[in-house]
Amino acid sequence: MSISRRAVLATAGTALLSGCASSGTNVTGPNGTPSSLEVFSWWTEGGEHAALASLVSEFHVHNPHIDFINRAVAGGAGANAKAELARRLAAGDPPDTFQGQAGAMLDDYVDAGQLEDLGFLYQQQGWDRTLSGTLLQLTQRKGRQWSVPLDIHHINVIWANRHVCERAGVPTAPASVDDFVAALHKVAATGKNPLAISATPNEIWQVKHLMECLLLAGVGAAAWPALWRTGANWASPQVTQALEQLRTILALAVNPTAEVSWNQASAMVGRGDAAYQIMGDWTEASFVLSGLSPHLDYGWAPAPGTGEAFLFASDCFTLPKGAKDRDAAIAWLVECGSQAGQDSFTAVKGAIPPRAVIGESERGLFDVYSNWSMVEWTTKQVVGSLTHGVVARAAWNNAIDAALNQFVTTRDPARLQTALEAAAKQYAGAI
Ligand code: GAL
């Protein structure tokens, strides 16, 4: 897909979603009964909204009789959605299906007995043969399948405004963390904001996202899983160094305590108000929607020091027990697990499909960034994200958020490391 076609698809989809998003009007299904589908997610911004709309449009090709009710709750990385979902599940009022993230985050719902086993759909649709092995494993718990992956997102990516970097004489793809810090200083000297990031309590996940990239650079991909499985190495000098780098980098960002969503931060880079952002590849979708051109206007690369690794997350959908329209929810899951559904979503979202084999002609649907990401996925060491649900459950993530909120005030890396060690002691191995 050329960039302009991709942007057109995204825009057309957005119009469609706005049209049907909150109508809530049930329409008649094939057997004469009303059919509506309440889909819960946190996709409200930029390319997120556009990609959801594109998926809904594809869904309606196969399910014209099902009314789509959009229950997206704003807040990047589910900052508000996760709490709202927990409230609804506790009140016995589940949506028909909700966005989850493959891995530890989903295990909380499985262990609480809130999800239906999806083994029957996996069998019927043959997904155990088509899904990427990494994801197939992550959707399993207690020997059963609990979710349907829709995408693979690349988490360790640095985005750069090419023009700002050229003017400051810095690379768009700093290879090491030291190179990155040197580049941030040079950009600062030109009067531009070196790094778009927000560190308010609501946006603390952006700092966690940056921190996990620095930690990954420090400990390396081979040692990454042990941090989460056994809680090893949290006291290591590599972690100390990564947290000191976090302090240095945060100190170079202009006004990080202003409330700025990830999408607004991406727009700062896109407009040339900031040089860099370290963020997942949903940022790419927002650049495309703003009419920017890859390579010409913006560049990307593995986050500094993480070139050996592909840090990933995968959005997936579930079947909550007690879904009001179970049949409609199953139709949605079938769409999410299908090639057409995954392509319609991922090609707009900046992500890649979660299937084991992506054919040549299918690759042609994706832009230059996503094609790069597909190659990275198959050639780099794949490791799971902290911020986006793969390696740590909600309670561990919450403890890390609390430690980071303190850090934003104290700027004391030693204290942060002590808090991270304590959290690891309490939660590691729980998966
Ligand atoms: C992630 C999610 C992505 C994207 C991002 C920003 O957690 O996996 O799909 O939406 O949050 O909100």
Image: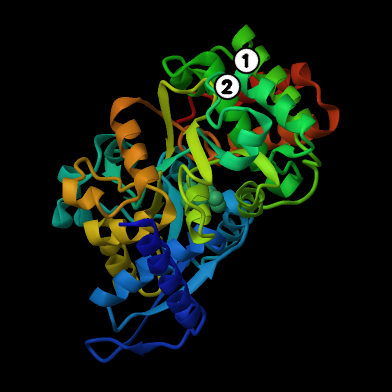
- Please state, as top left, top right, bottom left or bottom right, where the C terminus lies in the image: top left
Mark 1 and mark 2 residues within 8 Å of each other at the beta carbon: yes
Task: Give the camera-side residue of 406 and 219.
Answer: 219
User: Whole-percent x and y of residue 323?
Assistant: 40, 68
What residue is rendered at 21% in x and 45% in y?
A: 358
Three-letter amino acid code of the residue under disc 1: Val
**In which quadrant is the N terminus drawn?**
bottom left
Element type where label 1 sits in the image: helix
Depicted 310 relative to depicted 273: above or below: above
Q: Secondary structure at mark 2?
A: helix
Q: Earlier in the sequence, mark 1 or mark 2?
A: 2
Name the residue tied to disc 1.
239
Kindly identify which numbered label has been placed on residue 201: none
Q: Nearer the viewer, residue 349 or 115?
A: 349
Residue under numbered circle 2: 215
- Amino acid beneath label 2: Leu
Determine crowd level at label 2: few under 14, some 14-19, many 20+ residues with C-alpha closer than 10 A: many
Residue 221 occupies quadrant? top left
Q: Is residue 122 left or right of residue 214?
A: left
199 or 6, nearer to the observer:
6
Would you identify the image quadrant in which residue 159 lies?
top right
Residue 274 place in picture, x, y as percent: 69, 42
Residue at left offset 19%, top offset 49%: 127
